[in-house]
């Protein structure tokens, strides 16, 4: 049977981009993932999709490898650096980056939404 770990569903892709705030999840980067209509972001596997990849986890199924929880959005440069240095960028660190990044994006969205709603309250 062919490796299905790279067959990421459209809903998962949409969720990744929606919760990314259009920024690389690397806290030292934060580069825009789409600029002037050009996609610079890459969907990266936290635990590799294939046995030869970095941070591969033999215990995961292909469904788990392509699941939202195992994916992170990075710019192309960060994706390459991270995959070329798996000891420096272990699974736990990448999961932490993703969680912190998405929480920060959600907090910013809520602040913007609340500010907008406050302005509406002032309108007759």
Image (cartoon, grey):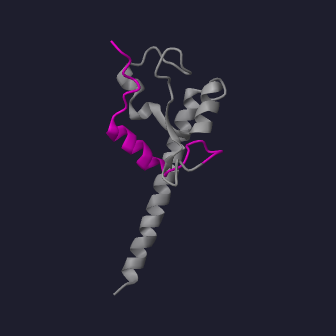
Residue 116 location, quadrant: bottom left
Residue 78 locus on image (x, y percent): 61, 37
In the rendered structure, the answer to whether residue 50 lies left or right of residue 3 reads right
Give the residue at x 55% y 21%. Answer: 55
* Quarter in which the N terminus is drawn: top left
Q: Is residue 48 above or below residue 77?
A: above
What is the chief secondary structure element of the magenta stretch?
loop
Start and end of the magenta stretch?
A: 1-30
Q: In this view, does 8 lie above or below 37?
A: above
Residue 40 locus on image (x, y percent): 54, 44
Residue farthest along the front direction in this orientation: 37
Residue 14 location, quadrant: top left
The mark total stands at 0
In the rendered structure, the answer to whether residue 38 lies left or right of residue 4 reads right
Residue farthest along the top direction in this orientation: 1
Give the residue at x 33% y 34%. Answer: 9
Q: Which is more toward the observer, 98 or 11?
A: 11
115 in the magenta segment: no
In the rendered structure, the answer to whether residue 57 lies left or right of residue 80 reads left
Residue 43 locus on image (x, y percent): 48, 36
* Quarter in which the C terminus is drawn: bottom left
Give the residue at x 39% y 72%. Answer: 117
Residue 95 locus on image (x, y percent): 52, 34
Give the residue at x 53% y 15%. Answer: 52
């Amino acid at each position: 049977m062919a490796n299905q770990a790279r067959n990421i569903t459209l809903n998962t892709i949409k969720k990744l981009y929606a919760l990314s705030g259009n920024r690389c999840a690397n806290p030292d980067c934060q580069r825009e993932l789409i600029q002037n209509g050009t996609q610079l972001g890459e969907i990266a596997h936290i635990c590799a999709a294939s046995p030869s990849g970095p941070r591969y986890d033999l215990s995961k199924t292909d469904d788990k490898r392509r699941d939202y929880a195992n994916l992170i959005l990075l710019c192309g440069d960060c994706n390459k650096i991270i995959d070329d240095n798996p000891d420096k960028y272990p699974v736990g660190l990448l999961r932490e980056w993703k969680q912190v990044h998405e929480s920060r994006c959600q907090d910013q969205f809520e602040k913007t939404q609340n500010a907008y709603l406050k302005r509406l309250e002032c309108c007759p």
